[in-house]
Image (tube, helix red, strand yellow):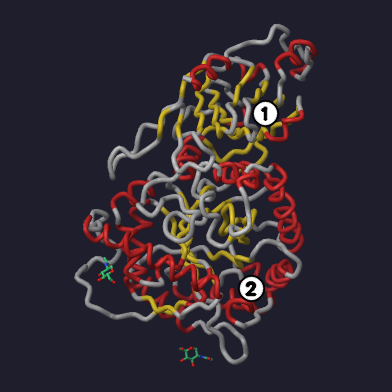
């Protein structure tokens, strides 16, 4: 009911309309003040500001899922497959702290499949096994958390099973797999020992698995994690070595290599990046770094709604970009692993509705700032920042990601924002062309969020206000709820293989958009004919 009331307010029109010359803005002061506008948008629809990778929103699986190889079978759950497929196209990065403690130990068991790489996508996990695995995972998580806290990581062996499951999962779901290799296998000269990677690459090639590669996770903290110090210069040389192996293999000559997956800039950390770029830039197809806003063990609900914390992404991104522009100006820059809170996420926050503000803002701001891919830690498994919970059911950030995929295209548009009130810094907006797969060319999608408790109002110019639109309003009864409503209806799977219809609400043209308090919103302007999107 509340929701319908708010929607009806949206079509409310001002008395004094905008009459700016040359399409600019002139506000009639009185009625605007009456309406208490929070934001006035001035989009430029003539040209694209920049274009991100079509797989901009991508996901990760933490390597800790393979610490006990049996848990990798969770990737064959039919529910996980259904939910994941809906997020394609996307990269799937397999990596994280434990990748640098993993060794490939092939079992060389007999294969019954004569056609490598042609396993059926229908070979799914029996329900009984899935149930057991989910139960066992709870216990396994405790063990992993203890290891994380003590920073003592057990050596892990993995077999063909892990690689086979990762491959069938990604190829069946339409993901591009990125496999993170262990960079802590080193010789007495502290040079990367590639012999285990060669064995793995040979196996993958024999199976004709389409894969991309990484080497090392957050090398800036190797010393803390393993007592081994590797400088950026040497790491760059190690990447050149890996690139050489890939070229030699033939099969992986044109595969992607990404790195160095450094932690976010923090004093000495950027030094690794600089050194790495000097020697290794030519080896990689994109420069990757990791970003988290807060420490999961020391944060609060307020942090998740704090615009100043959201803005920290800007300075960190700029810092990385400056370094890359200087040494390797044409390399794309990716967030190779990112989420709300490090240390596995913030319990009771990172897996709830409120996490969506950090996630959606990162997607919007990251695309505007110049990032080309943003990989969400994690799709399923480790920590509380996952998109699917321990029962493999979708959490609010899953639905948010799915809507983003369906509604938002890769073309970022420029939009000037003028604030009309003190609360306006708690209203955040980003503009893209709409996803062409869902909407006709020329339509645009406004991403917006209201970090205020009370409704906020955005004014849009004639070019948008004359268009019919669809609204997708995400809200929740509680900020720390694990469920979310789209246009007033609770989102949930209909069955393990069926997603609900994610329908928007058609609204009449209006020059005012009303955002409910604490809401995440997409507005698709259907008949704008934006030149930038045609
Ligand atoms: C779950 O754990 C129990 C006890 O360790 C074990 O016997 C069982 O095989 C495990 N189930 C699966 C599916 O791995
Ligand atoms: C590299 O690792 C392999 C396998 O563990 C080992 O046999 C070999 O001696 C190592 N090479 C160097 C140069 O350390």
Residue 212 visible in rendering: yes
For image coordinates 42% across by 47% down, the residue present is 88
At mark 1, the secondary structure is strand
- Residue count near mark 1 (Cα–Cα under 10 Å), binned few <14, some 14–19, many ≥20: few
Q: Quadrant of the C terminus?
A: top right
Q: In the figure, residue 160 lies in which quadrant?
A: bottom left
Pointer 1 residue Cβ closer than 8 Å to ligand 2: no
Residue 168 in percent (x, y) is at 33, 60
The front one of 309 and 346 is 346
Alpha-carbon distance for marks 2 and 1? 45 Å
Check the image and report above or below for 397 versus 68: above
Q: Please report the residue visible at 56 percent of the width from the left and 32 percent of the height from the top.
A: 519
Which of the two residues, 403 or 312, is positioned nearer the viewer here? 312
Q: Which one is closest to the eye, mark 2 or mark 1?
A: 2
Q: Which residue is mark 2?
A: 221
Under circle 2, the secondary element is helix
What is the total number of numbered labels drawn onto the structure image? 2
Where is residue 188, by image quadrant?
bottom right
Task: Classify 270 as above or below 232.
Answer: above
Residue at the image position 42 percent from the left and 54 percent from the top: 175
Q: In the picture provided, is 32 more to the left or to the right than 257?
A: right
Residue 333 shows in the view: no
Task: Tell me if residue 457 comes above or below residue 317 in the rendering.
Answer: above
Residue toward you, 206 or 127: 127
| Residue bearing the label numbered 1 | 46
Q: Position of residue 230 (x, y in %)?
A: 65, 79
């Amino acid at each position: 009911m509340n929701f319908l009331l708010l929607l009806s307010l949206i079509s409310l029109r001002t008395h004094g309309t905008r009459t700016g010359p040359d399409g600019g803005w002139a506000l009639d002061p009185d009625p605007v003040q009456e309406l208490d506008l929070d934001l006035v948008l001035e989009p430029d629809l003539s040209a694209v500001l920049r274009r991100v990778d079509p797989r901009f929103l991508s996901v990760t699986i933490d390597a800790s899922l393979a610490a006990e190889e049996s848990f990798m079978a969770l990737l064959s759950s039919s529910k996980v497959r259904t939910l994941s497929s809906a997020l394609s196209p996307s990269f799937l990065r397999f990596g994280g702290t434990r990748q640098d403690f993993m060794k490939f130990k092939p079992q060389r068991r007999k294969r019954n499949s004569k056609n490598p790489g042609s396993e059926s996508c229908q070979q799914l996990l029996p329900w009984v096994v899935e149930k057991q695995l989910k139960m066992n995972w709870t216990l396994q998580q405790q063990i992993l958390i203890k290891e994380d806290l003590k920073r003592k990581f057990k050596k892990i062996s993995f077999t063909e099973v892990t690689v086979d499951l990762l491959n069938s999962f990604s190829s069946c779901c339409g993901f591009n797999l990125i496999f993170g290799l262990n960079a802590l296998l080193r010789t007495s000269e502290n040079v990367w020992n590639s012999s285990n990677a060669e064995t793995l690459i040979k196996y993958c090639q024999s199976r004709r698995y389409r894969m991309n590669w990484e080497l090392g996770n957050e090398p800036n903290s190797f010393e803390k994690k393993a007592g081994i110090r590797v400088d950026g210069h040497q790491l760059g040389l190690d990447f050149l070595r890996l690139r050489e192996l890939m070229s030699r293999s033939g099969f992986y000559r044109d595969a992607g290599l990404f790195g160095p997956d450094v932690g976010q800039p923090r004093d000495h950390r950027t030094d690794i990046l600089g050194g790495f770029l000097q020697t290794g830039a030519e080896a990689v197809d994109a420069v990757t770094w990791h970003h988290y806003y807060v420490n999961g063990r020391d944060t609060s609900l307020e942090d998740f709604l704090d615009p100043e914390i959201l803005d920290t992404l800007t300075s960190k991104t700029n810092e990385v970009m400056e370094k890359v522009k200087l040494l390797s100006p044409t390399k794309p820059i990716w967030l190779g692993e990112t989420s709300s809170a490090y240390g596995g996420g913030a319990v009771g926050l990172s897996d709830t509705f409120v996490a969506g503000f950090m996630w959606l803002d990162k997607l919007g701001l990251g695309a505007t700032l110049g990032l080309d891919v943003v990989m969400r830690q994690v799709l399923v498994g480790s920590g509380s920042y996952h998109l699917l919970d321990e029962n493999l059911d979708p959490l609010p950030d899953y639905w948010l990601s799915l809507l983003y995929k369906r509604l938002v295209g890769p073309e970022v548009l420029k939009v000037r924002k003028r604030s009309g009130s003190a609360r306006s810094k708690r209203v955040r907006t980003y503009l893209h062309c709409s996803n062409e797969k869902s909407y006709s060319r020329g339509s645009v999608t406004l991403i917006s969020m209201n970090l205020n408790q009370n409704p906020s109002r955005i004014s849009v110019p004639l070019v948008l206000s004359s268009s019919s639109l669809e609204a997708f309003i995400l809200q929740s009864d509680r900020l720390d709820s694990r469920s979310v409503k789209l246009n007033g209806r609770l989102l949930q799977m209909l069955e393990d293989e069926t997603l609900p219809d994610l329908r928007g609400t058609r609204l009449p043209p209006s020059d005012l958009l009303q955002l409910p308090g604490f809401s995440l919103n997409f507005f698709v302007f259907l008949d704008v004919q934006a030149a930038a999107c045609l």
